[in-house]
């Protein structure tokens, strides 16, 4: 029989007894794990603990820190039934107490739960059951139909909310008029009329608060619904009693006050606040909606027989040839096979200038074709496209939590019970100290405390700012993977840049061409023709340079590649050569002083020089180097203006590194650096107290990226670098790095503003509601005003977050 306190954690890359021993020793250090045993053959580790929900995540973190892996599944599920931050906290605790869950976070702002779990220990369906038992629901089913039904559910829910709000307001307005106008207040049966008007608002339009509060009570929990139900229910029942039994108070010399208008108007205000909040929350995730709207519903697929078929996007397969007409959106990732055009890639890269596309060029889903038309072959479809990956990353990042949110979660977890205790103490204090109207005033003060205290503003403060920040980044071509990196980036004071592919283009380009004879179209065409037949990597740079410069391809040139030296071409009974010094020496070419001087100058700039010559003299020389990106110099300058130290690390030689550093304005650089040494350098800077951002694009940068405080990958680099990095610059434009740092600073500033106002609101509001000013000036806050203030607090927090979206 299996022990309920024992599980087997699956392992990856544990290949030997030595590996098993390392994992075994690592687990033995853990506080919560009381027994362990690592099996190599079955690749699993036995964990025993009376706190499995704590022991399993602890064990997974330890195993990963030792260099081994535990296969887990990371998924984001929609959550139904949340009404405030306390709900989110309750669901999060439920998830984290489920053995097999490595990490679970719930985002109230976008109503999702991000869960990493071990599928052999817990299933998505079991997670759903746990959440349902807590009084909420988790949507674990997948597919377009589920998404469509979920969208329809939210639309219907929002429509219902608007109807209930309109109904509550319609009944509350005459209720307030009767309660506030003395002539109407004292008319016959005024209390009964107000009772009739308040009942639909409290018991019908506000029924969701009472249903939610009952669910929470049945699960021994409390949330915002509890506060609203207690406050309005108390005011309503107190007013009903006073309407039916006014003599109870009259016999004691007191007036039988009714507060029907307070109960109804509080519900109306809270419903109105929820409508405004939902609309504002919808705006925070508009970046996702924009990205999702980029993919067309159908495409034109060219069939083998030449016919065109209008095909749904879900049915497109890898290898299909797709026709793109002017103005159409590109549906999937692929490679152009015929035709040419310019494509607007701004929504993916953030770059406004359309990109030229011709044969063999890559095209991406979500980008927009301009005036031309072309055909391309599908290479990535569905969830594998770049657009789908961006959407997934943005969704996960918007659902992640900034470190500061942990404190807020703890506060939200105890907020509602604390408010209920304060409300009860308020009532007791008024009864004891309030004199003849003490009980009546105490009831109202208690109701006002329950109404004004709302954890929603606290719950929305951080996630709405993060959602807007991540969305703003995505719109500008900065893909942010988690909230932690977004919060940390503002503190960066040292940036390490890889050279090749990061500062430079990562491919050779022609820097200069010098003719030592009269330049002619014939000679340029001959040079172009010979290099187009070359197998050397530098030949592509020369061919690319001369394309479109009035050259033509000569079909009557006989070429011969000479390994390690260059290439020769026989044209019109004369031999020409293109190559290095070794080939020129072999041909016994004597360099004129002008030629020697120019070659020396270009080599001094760490550039490779290739000569074009005939059997007598050098006709031209070409300087080739890895091109520095157009924006690298301005990006380095912008970072230095922020007083951030910029370092360059490269495996290239000292001369090349010095030349690139000088051209870009980088003061600190290291050449001949091995991949492992890059990570060591990151560690060294961190030991000096620096917050380090590592920027790279290759597999050789992955260790350093993993080590850095903030890791940034170039979008045109290797997949491994992008997997490791917490941020990706899709366009590989270094100028986006200062933008990312600015975005981090703005987001954190917004979070702090939101938290300040959320805390300040409750710190000021609750004592006012309790009647702290009454002994001084007779001021007692009206429950209706408390309801309006509570609704306004949530809306103001979300609106403040949206300011970041609207700013430049």
Image (tube, grey):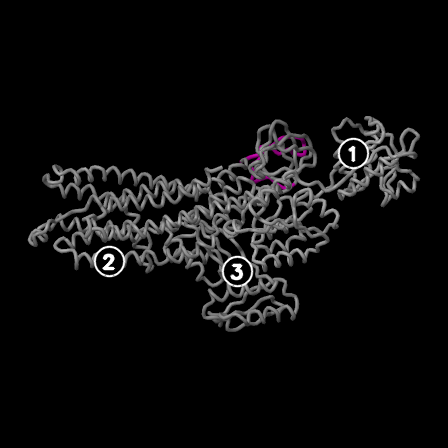
468 relative position to 492: left or right: left
Residue 513, disc:
1
Q: Earlier in the sequence, mark 2 or mark 1?
A: 2
Alpha carbon of mark 2 to alpha carbon of mark 1: how far?
86 Å
Q: How far from the left and from the top, in percent, is residue 767?
A: 27, 53
In the image, the segment drawn in magenta is 297-318
789 relative position to 593: left or right: left
Residue 653, disc:
none
Q: How far from the left and from the top, in percent, is residue 657?
A: 71, 48
Closer to the camera, 80 or 728?
728
Question: Which residue is labeled 3 in the image?
Answer: 118
Q: Earlier in the sequence, mark 3 or mark 2?
A: 3
Q: Are marks 1 and 3 in contact (CB under 8 Å)?
A: no
- Camera-nearest label, 2 or 1: 1
Question: Which residue is labeled 2 in the image?
Answer: 424
Residue drawn at the location 75% of the way across and 50% of the way down:
653
Magenta span includes 302: yes
Alpha carbon of mark 3 to alpha carbon of mark 2: how far?
44 Å
Residue drawn at the location 24% of the way across and 47% of the way down:
783
687 relative position to 358: left or right: left
Relative to 189, residue 344 above or below: above
Alpha carbon of mark 1 to alpha carbon of mark 3: how far?
60 Å
Closer to the camera, 715 or 204?
715
């Amino acid at each position: 029989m299996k022990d309920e306190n024992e599980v087997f954690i699956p392992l990856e890359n544990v290949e030997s007894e030595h590996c098993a021993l390392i994992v075994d020793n690592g687990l033995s250090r853990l506080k919560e794990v009381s027994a362990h045993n690592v099996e190599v053959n079955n690749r699993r580790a036995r964990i025993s603990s009376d706190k499995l929900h704590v022991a399993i995540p602890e064990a997974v973190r330890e195993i990963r820190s030792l260099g081994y892996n535990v296969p887990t599944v990371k998924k984001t599920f929609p959550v139904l039934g949340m009404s405030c931050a306390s709900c989110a906290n309750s669901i999060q605790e439920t998830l984290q107490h489920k053995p097999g869950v490595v990490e679970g976070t719930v985002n109230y702002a976008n109503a999702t739960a991000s869960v990493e779990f071990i599928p052999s220990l817990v299933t998505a369906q079991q997670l759903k059951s746990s959440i349902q038992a807590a009084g909420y629901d988790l949507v674990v089913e997948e597919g377009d139909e589920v998404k469509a039904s979920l969208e329809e559910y939210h639309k219907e829910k929002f429509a219902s909310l608007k109807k209930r709000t309109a109904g509550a307001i319609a009944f509350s307005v005459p209720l307030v008029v009767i309660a506030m106008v003395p002539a109407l207040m004292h008319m016959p049966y005024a209390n009964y009329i107000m009772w009739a008007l308040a009942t639909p608002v409290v018991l019908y339009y506000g029924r969701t608060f009472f249903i939610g509060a009952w669910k929470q009570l049945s699960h021994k929990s409390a949330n915002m619904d509890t506060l609203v139900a207690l406050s309005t229910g108390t005011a309503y029942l107190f007013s009903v009693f006073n309407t039916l039994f006014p003599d109870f108070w009259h016999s004691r010399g007191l007036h039988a006050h009714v507060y029907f208008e307070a109960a109804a108007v509080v519900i109306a205000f809270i419903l109105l606040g929820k409508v405004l909040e939902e609309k504002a929350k919808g705006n925070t995730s508009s970046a996702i909606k924009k990205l999702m709207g980029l993919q067309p519903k159908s495409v034109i697929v060219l069939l083998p027989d030449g016919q065109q078929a209008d095909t749904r996007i879900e049915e497109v397969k890898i290898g299909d040839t797709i026709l793109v007409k002017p103005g159409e959106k590109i549906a999937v990732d692929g490679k152009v096979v015929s035709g040419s055009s310019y494509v607007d890639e701004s929504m993916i890269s953030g770059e406004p200038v359309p990109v030229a596309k011709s044969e063999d060029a890559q095209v991406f889903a979500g980008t927009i074709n301009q005036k031309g038309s072309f055909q391309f072959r599908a290479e990535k479809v569905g969830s594998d496209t770049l657009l789908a990956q961006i959407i997934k990353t943005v969704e996960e990042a918007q659902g992640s939590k900034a470190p500061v949110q942990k404190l807020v979660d703890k506060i939200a977890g105890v907020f509602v019970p604390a408010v209920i205790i304060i409300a009860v103490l308020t009532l007791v204090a008024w009864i004891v100290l309030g004199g003849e109207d003490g009980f009546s005033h105490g009831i109202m003060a208690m109701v006002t405390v329950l109404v004004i205290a709302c954890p929603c503003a606290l719950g929305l403060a951080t996630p709405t700012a993060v959602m807007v920040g991540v969305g703003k980044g995505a719109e500008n071509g900065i893909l942010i993977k988690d909230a932690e990196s977004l919060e940390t980036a503002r503190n960066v004071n040292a940036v390490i840049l890889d050279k090749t592919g990061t500062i430079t283009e990562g491919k050779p380009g022609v820097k200069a061409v010098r003719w030592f004879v009269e330049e002619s179209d014939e000679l340029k065409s001959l040079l172009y023709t010979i290099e187009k037949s070359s197998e050397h990597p530098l030949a592509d740079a020369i061919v690319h340079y001369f394309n479109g410069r009035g050259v033509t391809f000569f079909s009557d040139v006989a070429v011969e590649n000479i390994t390690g030296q260059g290439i020769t071409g026989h044209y019109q009974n004369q031999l020409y050569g293109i190559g290095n010094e070794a080939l020129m020496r072999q041909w016994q070419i004597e360099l004129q002083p002008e030629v020697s001087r120019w070659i020396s100058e270009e080599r001094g700039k760490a550039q490779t020089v290739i000569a074009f010559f005939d059997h007598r003299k050098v006709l031209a020389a070409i300087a080739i180097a890895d091109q520095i990106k157009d924006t690298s110099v301005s990006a380095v300058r912008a970072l230095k203006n922020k007083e951030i130290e910029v370092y360059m690390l490269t495996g290239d030689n000292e001369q090349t590194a010095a030349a690139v550093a000088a051209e870009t304005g980088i003061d600190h650089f290291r050449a001949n650096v091995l991949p492992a040494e890059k990570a060591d350098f990151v560690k060294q800077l961190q030991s000096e107290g620096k917050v380090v951002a590592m920027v790279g694009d290759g597999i050789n940068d992955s260790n350093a990226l993993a080590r850095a405080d903030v890791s940034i990958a170039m979008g045109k680099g290797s997949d491994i670098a992008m997997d490791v990095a917490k941020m990706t610059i899709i366009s590989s434009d270094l100028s986006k790095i200062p933008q990312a740092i600015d975005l981090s600073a703005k987001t954190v500033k917004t979070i702090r503003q939101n938290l300040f106002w959320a805390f300040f609101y409750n710190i000021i509001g609750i004592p006012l509601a309790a009647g702290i000013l009454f002994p001084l000036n007779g001021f007692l806050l009206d429950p209706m005003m408390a309801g309006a203030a509570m609704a306004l607090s949530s809306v103001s927090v979300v609106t403040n977050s949206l300011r970041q979206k609207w700013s430049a």
